[in-house]
Image (cartoon, helix red, strand yellow):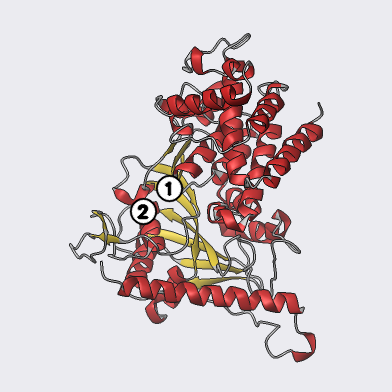
Amino acid sequence: MSTNGLIQKVWNFCNTLRDDGMGYGDYLEQLTYLLFLKMADEYSKPPYFRDTHIPQEYNWETLTNKNGAELEVHYVHILSQLGKEQGMIGQIFFKAQNKIQDPAKLLKLVRLINEETWIGLDTDVKGDIYEGLLEKNAEDTKSGAGQYFTPRPLIRAMVDCMQPEPMKTIADPSCGTGGFFLAAYDYLAKKELDREQLKFLKYETFRGWEIVPNTTRLCLMNLFLHNIGDLNSEPPVERNDSLISQPAKRFDYVLANPPFGKKSSITVTNEDGDQEREALTYQRQDFWATTSNKQLNFLQHIRALLKVDGKAAVVLPDNVLFEGGAGETVRKRLLQSTDLHTILRLPTGIFYAQGVKANVLFFDNKPASKNPWTKEVWIYDYRTNVKHTLKTNPLRLDHLQDFVDSYSPDNRQNRVETDRFRKFSYDEIIARDKTSLDIFWLKDDSLGDMDNLPNPDLLALDIVENLESALDSFRQIVSRLEPV
């Protein structure tokens, strides 16, 4: 079957299940389990002969010779037993459940998968199918999966700026479905790598953390389909809260989009012994500031994850740029201890979660010094007078190409100021109220130009974005007022 034909076949069956009330997320899960079993079966046979660590009584072939209620019962048993295994298998099947209530449709999905030899498929084909389903799942607002899905063009642009090198490690403390890892893998795989570099890329390069079990499962399968790790290796993603303790290992690069919002209740103990008490305690003596702001904690954690010469690119909401108190402390310490050299201001309308106003902070870690490492911060404003919507004008990589060119990844000394790209000295920033990095200079053309107002649908979206942002701010205030 052709690539397009196979993709269409998978999509068509997804639509059939959706008619029965099954969402993309549930379909993705079941597809994950069954694809994994099928590929493990293929790896166990010639020419691979791999020990897949899947007991014979729970392998793929035991599903292909059953139907009806017998198939459903056996499938449920397989999910339960494999969830107790070690390594990647146990992680993928952790607390797995059968969501296909109609045995006839389960049989149809088993036969659909059994008709293909998946190991022989190009990695891009398998990955494209899975990534497409992940994106559809993110679009499904009822699933809530949008919060785990960073726009792929933004990820690509961040990787193009970072230019990761072979034989170096890449971490993501909130890896979601693995988008940053896949983009970095594609970037590195295009280079002429020797055998040692290819082995390192497959088994040693990536390390992630994800707190949501179902998302961890989707991520591991996504990485496996893209040739990262294998059945016999330890999973590259750990299922837990990455903020819970100081990192045991440091990394060359961190690429991340930490979750937005401030839902978690925490107490952080900083290096001065100050505490703010709420429900969950993070004993982090390495943090600069005590705060319940999740994004500020992730920013501090990401800095701690870096080697002395490590580099980071992280998506963060606007409040990180201007919030006082702990926010000001973190910004000052970040300017002091790292080279915070670039900020990309993102437009609204590019995330599945509404009301998000975000930025990408690029910084290089540095050794301890009396003098601040940040000499100047370059800010690229891709927000003012930029309108994106998920349906009518979605973000594409070419939209961010001018930023990547302006970033000058080959040599940042060659940067040139433009209308959208300006530099601000350390002294200018430190003199601003609360050391605010919330800097803009372009005139918003929609203000005051009554003859050329945007289309009503764009105005409505702007209103929704602003209301959602305001509501989020109010929720954060309420959460701080609530008693423990």
Mark carried by residue 301: 2
- Residue 258 can be seen in this image: yes
**Residue placed most toward the observer, 45 or 113:** 113
Report which residue position mark 1 lands on: 173
As drawn, the residue found furthest toward the front would be 69
Say which quarter of the image contains residue 405: bottom right
Residue drawn at point x = 36 percent, y = 53 percent = 301
Q: Give the structural element (helix, strand or loop) at label 2.
A: helix
329 sits to left or right of 217: left
Quote the CA–CA distance across marks 2 and 1. 8 Å
Which circle's residue, 2 or 1, is located before the other in the chain?
1
The reply to whether the C-beta atoms of the residues labelled 2 and 1 are less than 8 Å apart is yes
Residue type, mark 2 in image:
His
Where residue 19 appears, as percent x and y from the top left, is 70, 46
Q: Which amino acid type corresponds to the residue marked 1 in the rendered image?
A: Pro
**Which label is found at residue 142?**
none
The image shows residue 286, relative to residue 438, as above or below, that is above
Looking at the image, which is closer to me, 25 or 408? 25
Foreground mark, 2 or 1?
1
* Label 2: few (<14), some (14–19) or many (≥20) C-alpha neighbours in 10 Å: many
Q: Is residue 373 visible?
A: no
Q: Nearer the viewer, residue 391 or 364?
A: 391
